Image (tube, helix red, strand yellow):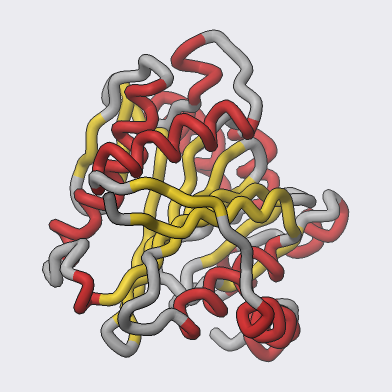
Amino acid sequence: MSEFRLLETGFQDGYTNMAIDEAVVNLHKKGDKPTIRFYGWKPHAVSIGYFQGIEEEVDLAKAKELDTDVVRRITGGGAVFHERELTYSFVCTEESNLVSKKILDSYKMICGGIVKGLDELEVKASFVPLNDIIVNDRKISGNAQTRRERKVLQHGTLLLGLSVDKMFSLLKVPDEKMKGKIIESVKQRVTSLEQETGREYSFKDVSEAMQKGFEKEFGVELVEGELNEEEKALAEELREKFSSKEWNFKR
């Protein structure tokens, strides 16, 4: 049976998390085992999409007050509040033929690991294009992807719990007069494992279920590994970028 490398890097600040993701994809070479990483965020954080403006998306004064990291991703998409969740990243080469060169098809397959992982927790989920996973018609996971030098990086969230009011104390909305209605709409459209099951899950329980899900989706065994010295060194270097004003305020 083929093997993927499994990284479980625990809870890190937002700058470190984004630095590790970029280090792993930058150093990934043809012939390397694909890598799946599970991680959490401490302190909680807001990540913004690569093409977004930080001051347009985030109340920076509130973020400072709540000790919230704000970091720009290398992937596109919208601003995301990271608190009670499991985040994953997936890295492989296009030459591995593990995922389609068509973006939508590749989203569907990689997200299939999360869908099958939720099935391990007896939660029925499905993939909805372009890049969401839903349970009972409500979003429980958002995902983003980038490709560089024929390598694929996809990362995404799986909500364990949800604090919509806290999220919108940090995220700006286009029309403040509509903020209340927007919050209520999000509460209707977004869900979490806790909401769906009435249970609290440990990070470990969920990561083990997701591991099984990815193994079933790709027909492989995930073998626990660790960042090599080159990846650690590059991640440390990249953390300076992700924590810099030059990067985060570039748009």
Q: Is residue 114 above or below residue 148?
A: above
Where, by quadrant of the figure, is residue 67 drawn? bottom right
- Residue 22 as seen in the image, left or right of residue 40: left
Pick out the residue farthest to the top: 198
Give x and y (percent) for residue 90: 40, 60
Where, by quadrant of the figure, is residue 145 drawn? bottom left
Q: Is residue 146 above or below residue 199?
A: below
- Residue 115 as seen in the image, left or right of residue 248: left
Q: Is residue 89 visible?
A: no
Pick out the residue farthest to the front: 1
- Residue 53 as seen in the image, left or right of residue 68: left
Give x and y (percent) for residue 12: 74, 57
Work out whether residue 57 or residue 37 is closer to the camera in this orientation and state it.
37
Give x and y (percent) for residue 245: 73, 85
Give x and y (percent) for residue 99: 19, 62
Q: Is residue 22 above or below residue 115?
A: below
Q: In the rendered view of the protein, which quadrant contains the C terminus?
A: bottom right
Work out whether residue 58 or residue 174 is closer to the camera in this orientation and state it.
58
Q: Is residue 91 visible?
A: yes
**Residue, x 46% and y 59% (percent of image)?**
5
Count the numbered circles shown.
Answer: 0
**Residue, x 29% and y 20% (percent of image)?**
124
**Residue, x 69% and y 45% (percent of image)?**
169
